[in-house]
């Protein structure tokens, strides 16, 4: 391809939309005002001239920069030399001041250490050292027991406890010395507190329920020393025993103030009525016990945060051999101990009142009254109470007196047993015994004994109060002939049963009486049955049938079963049957229970009807008598109707 073609191709292939071409065209347009041949010819020359001129300008400017760089280089050299001189001066100064700086640094570290030790010492002194003024307040008997005393005591206890931390570290000597000092201070403080509480107890009145809060707080703190606390309680109990004993005597005879005011109602005024007298004394004891319990609860237990139990638990924590502490039980033990002084005079008066009367019923009612209070005090004070033991012994004394009086009366009755009454009714001594027994059962029914135990517990009373009299009745019955003996015993048993049936706790004994009744009633049924057999003439017929063998001997060949004999028996039967029921009633007229009489006659009549049926079947049966209804007209149903 020739050069022209290549140039043409190059021109044609060029992209006139290129940015560089566009910019070149814009420059060309600005330089070429007219598109003439001269201007096109000079275009290149003008462009080169512009380039040369521009380069010359740049060279001039760079020469100025070069000159300035030379000046900067000179300045840098000067500065470098100055810095070198300065380094030399600094190095020399540093060599001279280094020991001084090291010493200053060491002094600063020592100062910081001293300041730390000073703060530690100050904190140690503030925490572990008690001032002389505080020690005097804590231990001196002339200083009052007030809030400041308790605050100092609390701080000393805290210091004593914190000494454990010192003992666990390297400061064991300081810990031991401080602990020993604090122990002395605490011992002196608790002794002071102990003596102060004793003085307060001398003037403390539990009858006034507004108890000083300070003594409650002091008791809670003192409870941390169980030995001192117990000694304080013993002192308190002794004081309360004297007060309660005097209060008991005032209740018995009336206090001076009540007597002067005319409002006295002394218990001794009712000494003639043993039941009320003893009831009033036991009621006073119960009221005093409840009041004492409430007052001691206010003093010792009220308020969970200040409860003395917490103080005692704290004290027992340092004595692991001691058992756990029950605040409620300990309070009841204290109440019980406070009442000990009252127990002896109360017991002697009650026993004297019981022993001075020979009425067995009265003794038993008193025993039941005491039993009521025994159950009541059991719920209040617990089973281990001395007061409860005293009441239990008085109950046993009353029961022994009851048994003694009862046995004396039984011996008197048995020594002079009367004859059975003519009407065979229950004897007077049994009626009297049943009246007394009913009073006993009324008294026992009102007791607090559990329903499940009442029957078993009262059985021993029945053995003492009923059995001897029934045995006396049996002795009288043996002197009578039947059926009078059986009628007499049935009357006695029915009277006893009527009394026992009124109460729910005598069911077993009523069943025993029913068994005894059944034996005598069965004997009376036998008697009435035998009477009806003999009176009706049926006995010979039954006896003959017992030995008769129908296979060997016809019935008509028996002498008693001949038509003439049967006619005679039938006529006798007709005469007897219309009045048989009335006659049987007459036999049992001295039985006290019409219902029992009717039942006995009904059993005997049914028995007779069954036997009559046997005779009637033998006579009217296939092996019986010819034309039987002519000589034996009565049927079984007719006999049953006549005897009903």
Image (tube, grey):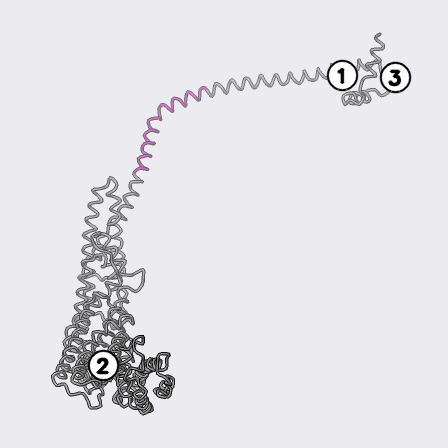
Residue placed most toward the observer, 575 or 20: 575
Residue 93 drawn in magenta: yes
Residue placed most toward the observer, 10 or 44: 10
**Of label 1 and label 3, which has the lower sequence position?**
3
Q: Which residue is mark 2?
A: 437
Q: Residue furthest top?
A: 2
Q: Secondary structure at mark 3?
A: loop
Count residues near mark 1 (Cα–Cα under 10 Å), then give few for <14, some for 14-19, many for 20+.
few
Does residue 447 appear left or right of residue 246 in this picture? right
Expressed as whole percent of the image width and height from the top left, the position of residue 443 reads 25, 79
Q: Quadrant of residue 613?
A: bottom left
Count residues near mark 2 (Cα–Cα under 10 Å), then give few for <14, some for 14-19, many for 20+.
many
Chain part drawn in magenta: 84-113
Q: Quadrant of residue 393?
A: bottom left
Alpha carbon separation for disc pair 1 and 3:
20 Å
Q: Which residue is mark 1?
A: 50
Q: Quadrant of the C terminus?
A: bottom left
Residue 136 drawn in magenta: no
**Of label 2 and label 1, which has the lower sequence position?**
1
Q: Residue furthest left?
A: 415
Q: Quadrant of the N terminus?
A: top right
Residue placed most toward the observer, 363 or 564: 564
Q: Disc number at residue 36?
A: 3
Alpha carbon separation for disc pair 2 and 1:
159 Å
Alpha carbon separation for disc pair 2 and 3:
168 Å
Q: Secondary structure at mark 2?
A: helix
**Mark in front: 1 vs 3:** 3
Count residues near mark 3 (Cα–Cα under 10 Å), then give few for <14, some for 14-19, many for 20+.
few
Q: Quadrant of residue 107?
A: top left
């Amino acid at each position: 391809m020739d050069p022209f073609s290549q140039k043409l191709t190059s021109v044609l292939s060029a992209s006139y939309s290129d940015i560089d071409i566009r910019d070149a065209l814009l420059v060309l347009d600005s330089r070429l005002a007219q598109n003439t041949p001269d201007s096109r010819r000079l275009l290149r020359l003008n462009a080169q001239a512009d380039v040369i001129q521009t380069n010359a300008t740049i060279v001039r400017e760079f020469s100025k920069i070069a000159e300035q760089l030379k000046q900067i280089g000179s300045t840098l050299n000067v500065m470098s030399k100055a810095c070198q001189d300065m380094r030399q001066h600094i190095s020399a100064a540093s060599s001279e001041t280094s020991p001084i700086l090291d010493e200053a640094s060491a002094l600063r570290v020592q100062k910081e250490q001293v300041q730390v030790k000073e703060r530690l010492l100050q904190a140690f002194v503030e925490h572990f050292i008690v001032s002389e003024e505080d020690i005097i307040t804590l231990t001196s008997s002339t200083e009052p027991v007030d809030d400041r005393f308790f605050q100092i005591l609390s701080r000393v206890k805290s210091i004593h406890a914190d000494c454990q931390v010192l003992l666990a570290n390297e400061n064991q000597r300081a810990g031991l010395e401080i602990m020993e000092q604090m122990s002395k201070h605490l011992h002196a403080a608790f002794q002071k507190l102990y003596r102060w509480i004793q003085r307060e107890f001398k003037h403390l009145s539990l009858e006034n329920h507004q108890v000083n809060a300070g003594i409650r707080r002091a008791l809670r703190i003192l409870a941390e020393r169980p030995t001192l606390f117990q000694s304080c309680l013993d002192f308190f109990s002794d004081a309360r025993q004297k007060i309660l004993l005097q209060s008991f005597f005032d209740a018995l005879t009336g206090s001076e103030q009540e007597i002067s005011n005319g409002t006295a109602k002394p218990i001794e005024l009712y000494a003639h009525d043993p039941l009320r007298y003893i009831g009033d004394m036991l009621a006073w004891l119960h009221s005093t016990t409840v009041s004492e319990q409430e007052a001691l609860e206010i003093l010792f237990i009220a308020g969970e945060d200040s409860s003395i139990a917490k103080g005692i638990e704290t004290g027992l924590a340092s004595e692991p051999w001691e058992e756990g502490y029950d605040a409620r039980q300990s309070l009841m033990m204290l109440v019980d101990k406070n009442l000990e002084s009252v127990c002896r005079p109360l017991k002697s008066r009650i026993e004297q009142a019981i022993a001075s009367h020979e009425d067995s019923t009265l003794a038993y009612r008193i025993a039941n009254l005491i039993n009521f209070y025994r159950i009541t005090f059991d719920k209040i004070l617990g089973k281990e109470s001395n007061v409860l033991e005293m009441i239990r012994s008085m109950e046993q004394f009353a029961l022994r007196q009851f048994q003694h009086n009862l046995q004396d009366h039984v011996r008197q009755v048995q020594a002079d047993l009367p004859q059975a009454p003519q009407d065979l009714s229950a004897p007077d001594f049994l009626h009297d015994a049943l009246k007394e027994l009913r009073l006993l059962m009324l008294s026992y029914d009102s007791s607090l004994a559990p329903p499940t135990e009442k029957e078993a517990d009262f059985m021993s009373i029945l053995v003492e109060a009923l059995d001897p009299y029934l045995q006396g009745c049996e002795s009288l019955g043996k002197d009578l002939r039947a059926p009078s003996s059986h009628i007499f015993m049935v009357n006695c048993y029915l009277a006893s049963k009527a009394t026992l049936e009124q109460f729910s706790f005598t069911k077993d004994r009523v069943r025993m009486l029913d068994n005894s009744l059944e034996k005598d009633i069965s004997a009376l049924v036998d008697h009435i049955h035998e009477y009806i057999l003999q009176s009706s003439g049926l006995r010979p017929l039954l006896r003959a049938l017992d030995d008769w063998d129908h296979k060997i001997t016809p019935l008509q060949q028996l002498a008693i079963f001949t038509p003439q004999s049967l006619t005679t028996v039938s006529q006798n039967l007709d005469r007897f049957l219309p009045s048989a029921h009335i006659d049987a009633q007459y036999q049992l007229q001295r039985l006290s229970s019409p219902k029992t009489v009717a039942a006995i006659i009904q059993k005997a009549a049914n028995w007779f009807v069954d036997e009559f049926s046997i005779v009637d079947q033998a006579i009217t049966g296939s092996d019986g008598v010819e034309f039987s209804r002519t000589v034996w007209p009565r049927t079984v149903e007719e006999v049953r109707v006549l005897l009903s």
